[in-house]
Amino acid sequence: MKRRRLLWILVITMGIVQKDEPEIPMYFDLPFQVGESFSRSIVGELMEDDFFAPITIELVSDKESPKFYTSDIKTTVCDDEICEIMYIKLYWDLVGEYVGYDTVSHHPLTKFDHEPFTKTDYARLHELLQNEGSILKFKKKEELIDKEKVKASDVVDGTTGATALEIKEEVVEGALYSSYTLWHLAYNGKIKNRLTGKTQSLLDKKLIKYLLNSNRTGYKLFAFQNFQEDDYITYKEYWLSSLENDIPLTRKYIIKNLPERIWTTASVQEAVCKMFTSYDVNTRTYLLNKLEETVQLSSKALEYISNDLTQMNRNQFRHYLDILSKRDTLTELTLANIRKAADDKSFKYAYLIEDYEWIN
Amino acid sequence: MIARIFYFLLISNFLVHFTNSQSILIEAESFDDAGGWVVDPQFVEQMGSPYLMAHGMGTPVANSKTSFLVDHAEEYHVWVRSKNWAPGEWEAPGRFKLAVGGHTLPETLGQTPGWSWEYAGKVRLNSGDTEIELVDLTGFNGRCDAIYLSTDERTPPNAGAELATWRKEVSKEAAIPEESLQFDLVVVGGGIAGCASAIAAAEQGLKVALIHDRPVLGGNASSEIRVHTLGIYGHFERILRMLDTEHYPNGSPEAYKDEIKRHENVEKYDNIHLFTNWRAYDANTEGNRITSVDARHTSEGKRIRFVAPRFVDSTGDGWIGYWAGADFMYGREAVDTYGEAYEEWGELWSPKESDDFVMGSSVLWRTKKSDSKADFPAVPWAEEVAQSHEATEGTWKWELSRLDLHQIEDAEEIRDRMLKAIYGSFANAKKLEGGEDLEFEWISYLVGKRESRRLEGDYIFTFNDVTEQRKFPDSVVMETREVDVHYQQNLMDEDKPDFLSEAIFYKTPKYYIPYRSLYSKNIENLFMAGRNFSCSHIGLGGPRVMRTTGQMGAAVGIAAVICDKYGIDPREVYTDHLEEYMSLIEAQKTYNTIAPKK
């Protein structure tokens, strides 16, 4: 095995120099500026194999609420032979999602041939770090380079021609290992767990409201995941709004986890079913499953769904008709809508209605 | 191919009144000459029969033909059992016509949503040999299950049990298969796991039946699906090297080379009796034991009863266990069921409440550059799925899982939705600069599944066995591959097409799977190997790849040898003969010769 040559002289001589407040990160996706009045508190230290020393994670707050997390990181970036030190400041939001980065004073990012990053490179890096599904997630370090193409004279991180083609398109050119190391830092599971754990420990009504009022998908889902039963009453308009407008994962979580005593209220059933057409395909199925399991079901709620039968796919339509079949009372409008669908020549699943004699 | 044609007097139950009409039923999959149509037996359990499909990638395929004997010169009504696989406000994509005795019937077929008998028209037939032809109009997956000619004008039953009963009556099919064969071990499913199982058992002298519903072996690794094998060899490098693939890009025709190797290696064992193009359709039981498995030839319709003391379910979908009444699992367990949280991934990894989401199915495809401009027809029926997505090949990310679509019961709809995604994305790519000379090289028409039924064994392998790197006294399979669980991209972003997935990786050192996960807990003589082994949804994430499932197959094949030696059931290998079993497993590392064949 080749011995790693660790270049650590720089660290001793310069160390990390903190920037003066106010902090203006190079890239920062949260919708506010980091003000002078922000306070910082240490969340804890964390050590990973590649870290030069344990990193300290800080929570940054204003007077109203916690705002984000940050950490100055000093890590090694290695290929097979050489290790370099990289300095970077990373930012995560309150649920541990990457939101930006900054360089550390006197330590601009460099490529492996020591050329400094260009403006484009910095932007490219942020773009890469925003991509949670990057191909880097699936690669081991040894898979980054197509070894057959490496020439003896090449400096490793500069051998973009040798970088596996699928990876080349995603990383900063000439900074393959730095890109790899930083992506895995931005999406480090231990860091994320530490951050969400801290946010969870701070959760109170004020913070829940802050999360619910934000425009961040992750914040709202996090709030719902930490709801107590009564919160579904207190924040009814919030979860109803998320059902209508949020991502499918959040909608599904709400539908699956609505407390029984809330769901059995006719007005809640009706409000949820009224939005049927604004749901994605999977949320619709979750809702139909829930309706099937519900004993006390509002006829009006079922009627709302009948307004948009042609939006359903085959199994959903059959499922809905099965649910109706088990009900003693249906509204006139529900029945009328089904008959209308049966006569609708453009409705591709109209033929399914023939199997339900009670309709005909 | 022997055409399956049934001539009968219509006195069966489906008619209200007794009639004396002449009728003929022709099963399309048994046509003498399939022409450019392919036999598709994937959805027999749902729609009733294998069928012929015009898989022309947008270019009409050559006619499929057969001939039949007309006894009575009369005027016949003609129906074709077909479906419009992409109904909507556009012309059906899979349109075709029927020609009988040289006359093309007026009605265009493949236009009705849902499988049904479409009326093709009336034709006057003279007695004697008559030719019938399927005339593809589009090359876009028109499908024909059967053709029915009758002097009576009433339509046969459309679907379900009624249709199945009618078919049996018409074909005068006996309750049990015509032929019965006896083996030491019956392996159902010729994927890598099934093949490994057959080889491991055959090398130790067992007489093995290997039943597979395709013409070629390999399952997802075959040239028909083209997924490369992943995972390590464990104890079974020698056997698995006979079966596995190079690390070619998924979808590559390099799959053919490995397929030839695989066939040569399986076929060199005289005591492996290979039944390709046979699809199992039932498992017969006495108490909690399987006595036999019945299978039908996918085009000729002949049936065989396979009798054996023990069976291996390597069907992927766990069909043998399902028919026999084995306990099974489907969907995602709640995170607390087995304590499988991966905290930073939360609900995407393992939900708070259980649900029926599973990892989805893929349909791989490739394009190539043509020498000249290559036209491609408009595909309005594909746009609702593909939307504005552009692509020129399929990758593992082309994966469909939707809560309302069951990976087994709705597999045809899943396949068809993927076809729409492919045709639509390709049509979009054709419109881009440089797309003029692109044409399809290959599109699979088989559903490449990742997850479906998982049969329950004495041990359920879970994520915890990975995180704790738990070793078992009966560790027969080992793996270092990351736990790789997929979710659909549109869960996080509704605007993403529903046929694209994303993966979550949990990287790990070596972990082990115990033998107790490889036999059924309640069907006493049933092994399982492949993705239908006993595991949780998350547990499947790592070992679902084909070298690992191949290890399972080999381990099961050797266990069957111990069972045969002592006349015992799979469970007793663990309880009473573990030491001997594990020595045999260990010996596989140095085993270099093929045992004497029966």
Image (cartoon, rainbow, N blue to C red):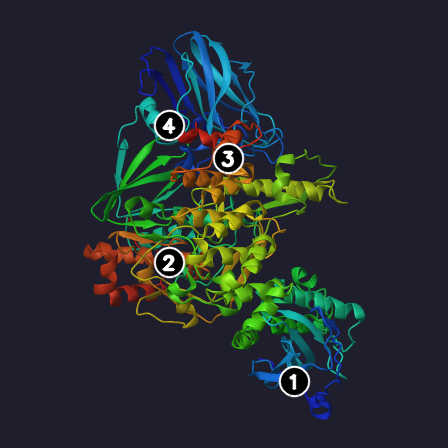
Q: Are marks 4 and 2 in contact (CB under 8 Å)?
A: no
Q: Residue furthest bottom?
A: A13
* Residue corresponding to mark 4: B163
Describe the element under mark 2 as helix, strand or loop.
helix
Describe the element under mark 4 as helix, strand or loop.
helix
Report the amino acid beneath label 1: Arg
Residue A305 horizontal side relative to residue B300, left or right? right
Q: Give the image location of residue B315, x and y in percent.
A: 38, 47
Report the amino acid beneath label 4: Leu
Foreground: disc 4 or disc 2:
4
| The label number, if any, that marks residue B129 in the structure image | none
Determine the CA span between mark 1 and mark 2. 44 Å
Residue B404 vs residue B102, the one in the foreground: B404
Residue A165 horizontal side relative to residue B45, left or right? right
Which chain hosts label 3?
A: A
Foreground: disc 4 or disc 1:
4
* Residue corresponding to mark 3: A333
Which residue: 73% across, 70% down?
A: A174
* Residue corresponding to mark 2: B552
* Residue corresponding to mark 1: A5
Q: Residues within 10 Å of mark 3 (few under 14, many from 20)?
A: some
**Label 4 or label 2, whichever comes before in sequence order:** 4
Residue B31 horizontal side relative to residue B296, left or right? right
Determine the CA span between mark 4 and mark 3. 35 Å
Describe the element under mark 3 as helix, strand or loop.
helix
Residue B396 horizontal side relative to residue B205, left or right? right
Determine the CA span between mark 3 and mark 2. 56 Å
Residues indicated by labels 4 and 3 sit on the same polypeptide chain: no
Q: Residue furthest right?
A: A119
Foreground: disc 4 or disc 3:
3
